[in-house]
Amino acid sequence: MIFIVIFLMIIIVVLSTFLAFSVIRNIDMLNKLEEMGIQIEESLDILDEYHQKIDIASKTDVMFDDPVVKNLLNDISGCRDAVLIIANKLYGSLDDKEDNK
């Protein structure tokens, strides 16, 4: 009978150690995810700032009809749209996660 009690105590100690290790790792992972969320929000702020600058630049009239300049302005507009799509996807996924909390 004493051997069973000792065996069960050893199992409890081992399982408690595994549980403590798992909880510590989960807390570390949560902190990393929160830090990544903060970095994504800061990146979105930077993208928003540059989006505003590109938006103003792409709406200006071209003084000459050079096709290269027109293509460049079209590429800038395309980049602006791509940045908006990416930012909306990232921000939307952050909003979804915040709504689930």
Image: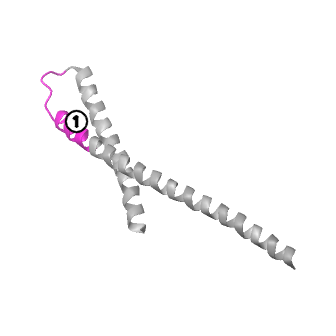
Is residue 60 magenta-colored?
yes
Quadrant housing residue 53? top left
Residue in front for this viewpoint, 33 or 68: 33
Q: Residue 55 in the image: x percent, y percent?
A: 21, 39
Quadrant housing residue 94? bottom left
> What residue is at 76 percent from the left and 67 percent from the top?
10
Q: Horizontally, is 14 left or right of 85 in the view?
A: right
Disc 1 marks a residue whose amino acid type is: Ile
Is residue 19 magenta-colored?
no
Q: Residue 88 in the image: x percent, y percent?
A: 34, 51
Mark 1 closeness class: few <14, some 14–19, many ≥20 residues within 10 Å: some
**Which residues are the magenta region?**
48-65
Residue in front for this viewpoint, 100 or 24: 24
> What residue is at 22 percent from the left and 36 percent from the top?
54
What colour scheme was applied to this rendering of the protein?
A: one colour
Residue in front for this viewpoint, 40 or 78: 40
- Predominant SS along the magenta part: helix
Q: Is residue 80 above or below residue 63?
A: below
Q: Which residue is mark 1?
A: 54
Quadrant housing residue 92? bottom left
Q: Residue 100 in the image: x percent, y percent?
A: 42, 68
Q: Is residue 55 above or below residue 2?
A: above
Which SS class for mark 1? Answer: helix
Q: Residue 14 in the image: x percent, y percent?
A: 72, 63
Residue in front for this viewpoint, 30 or 101: 30
> What residue is at 36 percent from the left and 60 percent from the top?
95
- Quadrant in the picture for the N terminus: bottom right
> What residue is at 29 percent from the left and 41 percent from the top?
47
